[in-house]
Amino acid sequence: MISARTLVVVVAALGVAAGLAGCGEQEQVIVYQQGKYQGKHDTRSWENEPGSSLYTTSKWKAGDKGGWETALKARNQNQNEYVRVGD
Amino acid sequence: MARMKFLCDTERCIECNGCVTACKQENEVPWGVNRRRVVTINDGVPGERSISVACMHCSDAPCMAVCPVDCFYRTEEGVVLHDKDMCIGCGYCFYACPFGAPQFPQAGAFGMRGKMDKCTFCAGGPEKDNSREEFAKYGSNRLAQGKLPVCAEMCSTKALLGGDGDVIADIFRDRALKRGKGAEVWGWGTAYGKPANPQQQAPKGAKS
């Protein structure tokens, strides 16, 4: 037979545990599962056919992450006027 | 590639609002919503500074942490996006964001908030890339076209830099060294975290 005092202690302990669980912080780690980011559907930028996009200036093959990164890095240097017009 | 970041050089921003206009035009942002805006500190006083502000796509985004329906997600490039099909327009993210990025269109006669809208780093959202649906909900997906955010790319003074964090940090560092002043990067500590030991030299080849 459980005494009333034990019962109160157990209930209080459960209450404290449940309350503290609310203080936990979920880690925000980028996890990509096939076609999904953190449960939301989305494709990655380099997975599409670049040729099918309107006004595409860069070329890479669908799924070629390295090619896409190279295209973006080249484009990034357009913001560097020391490269564009020289020192 | 490191991760996508914005950087506003306050020494160069001339408050032309070209970035605001370009963003509205590129993404066909509705009336009442500004994904990007220019804030001027000490307006009219000698030494005033202007800063172009939008979603900074934070490393530890407060909007993601407070969203009750967990509609946010972060892409591999560090871009914080959200699913408008899940958003309930509660406005918690607006209160949490240190940059005032989340915007809410007026929907209905009684001041009801519509679904949240914010800068997507021109990366669209959770619809088929460059589809009509994606454009209608989230605007242009320039990253999937091999381009960078239009606000940064068309900035006339190149005050606003956007793209790979390592590359734009190098561009800015080179610029600050050449002019010999103005090395302060507004908002970077808030958005991307401060180094534990600022005096420490960055290890070679490390990504920020």
Image: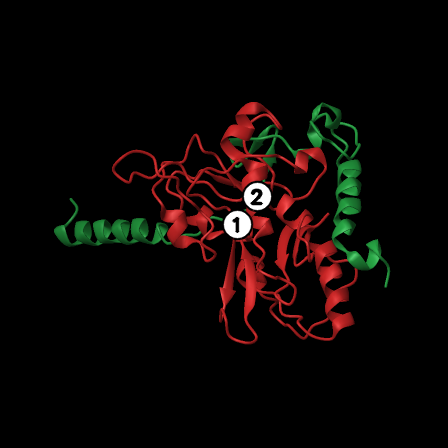
Front one among B40 and B130? B40
User: Where on the picture, by quarter, is residue A50?
Assistant: top right
Q: Is residue A67 above or below residue A52?
A: below
**Mark 2 — residue?**
B23
Residue A29 shows in this picture: no
Q: Position of residue A11 (x, y in %)?
A: 22, 49
Q: Position of residue B104 (x, y in %)?
A: 39, 42
Element carrying mark 2: helix
Residue depicted at 29% across the width and 38% down the height? B112
Which chain has been coloured red in this picture?
Answer: B
Nearer-N-terminus badge (1/2): 2
For chain A, the rendered hue is: green
The chosen color scheme is by chain
Residue depicted at 78% across the width and 51% down the height? A77
Element carrying mark 1: loop
Amino acid type indicated by mark 1:
Arg
- Badge 2: few (under 14), some or many (20 or more) residues near its Cα, within 10 Å? many
Q: Is residue B67 left or right of residue B152?
A: left
Q: Is residue B45 left or right of residue B198?
A: left
Mark 1 near mark 2, Cβ–Cβ under 8 Å? yes
What is the number of the mark on residue B36?
1
Q: Chain of mark 2?
A: B
What is the number of the mark on residue B61?
none
Q: Is residue B155 above or below residue B110?
A: below
User: Where on the picture, by quarter, is residue B10?
Assistant: bottom right
